[in-house]
Amino acid sequence: MNWIKPKKDWIPHQKSPTKKFLVEKAYSITQVAEMLAVSRRTIFKWLSIDEPEYAVIPPDAWFRLPSGHIRIREWVVIKIKRGEI
């Protein structure tokens, strides 16, 4: 097998570093209401979907699922608990 000769400066194929996906936690309206000891109605008021300029929870802190349900991102819940919002 003369045709297979090792190469001098050959670097073997290395696996690319595994991509670590950041998984962000998000909670339902009911879960957030329970965590903050307020009613679901209060959470909906804080979202202020019709009037975003009056929102306690900013528009980038929540999103709708394809089913129409709302999820609130964990970082905003933490800020509310700390009293930063």
Image: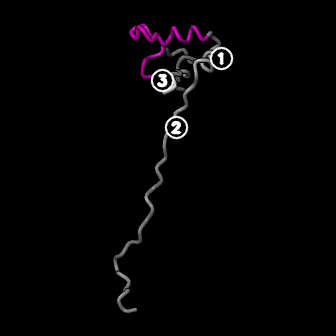
Is 54 inside the magenta-drawn segment? yes
Q: In the depicted view, which residue is nearer to us: 15 or 69?
A: 69
* Residue pictured at 52% horizontal, 25% vertical: 67
Q: What stretch is highlighted in magenta?
A: 40-65
Visual colour scheme: one colour
Residue 11 location in percent, x, y? 38, 72
Residues tagged 2 and 1 counted as in contact (Cβ below 8 A): no
Q: In the depicted view, which residue is nearer to us: 81 or 43?
A: 43
Give the residue type at disc 1.
Answer: Glu
Q: Which of marks 3 and 2 is nearer the N terminus?
A: 2
Give the residue type at disc 3.
Answer: Arg
Residue 52 location in percent, x, y? 40, 11
The numbered dot on residue 34 is: 1
Q: In the depicted view, which residue is nearer to us: 39 or 77?
A: 39
Label 2: which secondary element: loop
Residue 15 location in percent, x, y? 45, 62
* Residue pictured at 57% horizontal, 8% vertical: 42
Alpha-carbon span between mark 3 and mark 1: 20 Å
- Mark in the foreground, 3 or 2: 3
Alpha-carbon span between mark 2 and mark 1: 22 Å
Label 1: which secondary element: helix
Q: How crowded is mark 2: few (under 14 residues within 10 Å), some or many (20 or more)?
A: few
Q: Residues within 10 Å of mark 3 (few under 14, many from 20)?
A: few
The numbered dot on residue 64 is: 3
Residue 54 vs 58, above or below: the answer is above
- Mark in the foreground, 3 or 1: 3
Give the residue type at disc 2.
Answer: Val
Q: How crowded is mark 1: few (under 14 residues within 10 Å), some or many (20 or more)?
A: few
* Residue pictured at 34% horizontal, 76% vertical: 9
Residue under label 2: 23
Residue 42 vs 10, above or below: the answer is above
